[in-house]
């Protein structure tokens, strides 16, 4: 379900991650993860609005923005409680389920906003690192 077509590149990102690994301040490394988290949450928030409501609302509730040291992702569904998330998003011809690409639409409409959030947040991290 992961779509790797959308990326934000950080100039000297490798150097930034290297310096963050060497940083003794765990809060600084967490701030880096949080930069990705906040940017991915912009997309996740819109995806929740785009997602079908369904009878229980479990699909919408399962949409989460995640951040790591290197990337931000949007996770939809779980194998246990929302295993049908992929079928809803991508469709399932055999079962006559039409695609509803709610995450893709969220990316297309809010990628610019997510980039701005990321740039703002990662700039704060870079400033902390350089001081």
Image: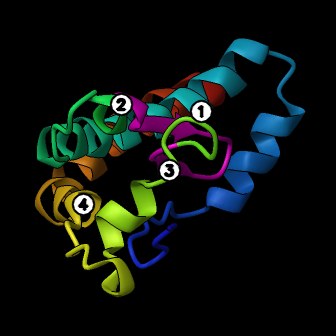
Residue 20: quarter of image: top right
Element on which disc 4 rests:
helix
Tell me the residue at 31%/75% (across/down).
91
Q: Position of residue 49 (x, y in %)?
A: 13, 38
Looking at the image, tell me whether mark 2 or mark 4 is earlier in sequence order.
2
Q: Position of residue 42 (x, y in %)?
A: 26, 38
* Mark 2 touches mark 1? (CB < 8 Å): no
In three-dimensional space, the C-alpha distance between marks 3 and 1, rounded to whole angstroms, equals 14 Å
Residue 28: quarter of image: top right
- Which dot marks residue 32? 1
In three-dimensional space, the C-alpha distance between marks 2 and 4, rounded to whole angstroms, equals 21 Å
Q: In screen coordinates, is 113 left or right of 22?
A: left
Q: Position of residue 43 (x, y in %)?
A: 28, 46
- Name the front one of labels 2 and 1: 2
In three-dimensional space, the C-alpha distance between marks 4 and 3, rounded to whole angstroms, equals 11 Å
In three-dimensional space, the C-alpha distance between marks 2 and 3, rounded to whole angstroms, equals 19 Å
The residue tagged 4 is 107
Where, quadrant-wise, is the C terminus in this rendering? top right
Looking at the image, tell me whether mark 2 or mark 3 is earlier in sequence order.
2
């Amino acid at each position: 379900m992961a779509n790797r077509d959308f990326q934000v590149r950080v100039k000297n990102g490798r150097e930034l991650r290297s310096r963050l690994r060497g940083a003794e301040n765990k809060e600084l490394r967490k701030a880096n993860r949080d930069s990705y988290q906040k940017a991915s949450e912009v997309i996740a928030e819109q995806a929740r609005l785009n997602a079908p409501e369904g009878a229980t609302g479990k699909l919408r509730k399962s949409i989460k923005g995640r951040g790591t040291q290197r990337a931000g992702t949007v996770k939809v569904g779980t194998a246990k409680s929302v295993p049908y998330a992929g079928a809803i998003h991508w469709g399932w011809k055999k079962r006559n389920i039409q695609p509803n690409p709610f995450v893709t639409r969220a990316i297309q409409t809010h990628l610019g906003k997510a980039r701005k959030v990321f740039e703002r947040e990662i700039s704060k991290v870079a400033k902390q690192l350089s001081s």
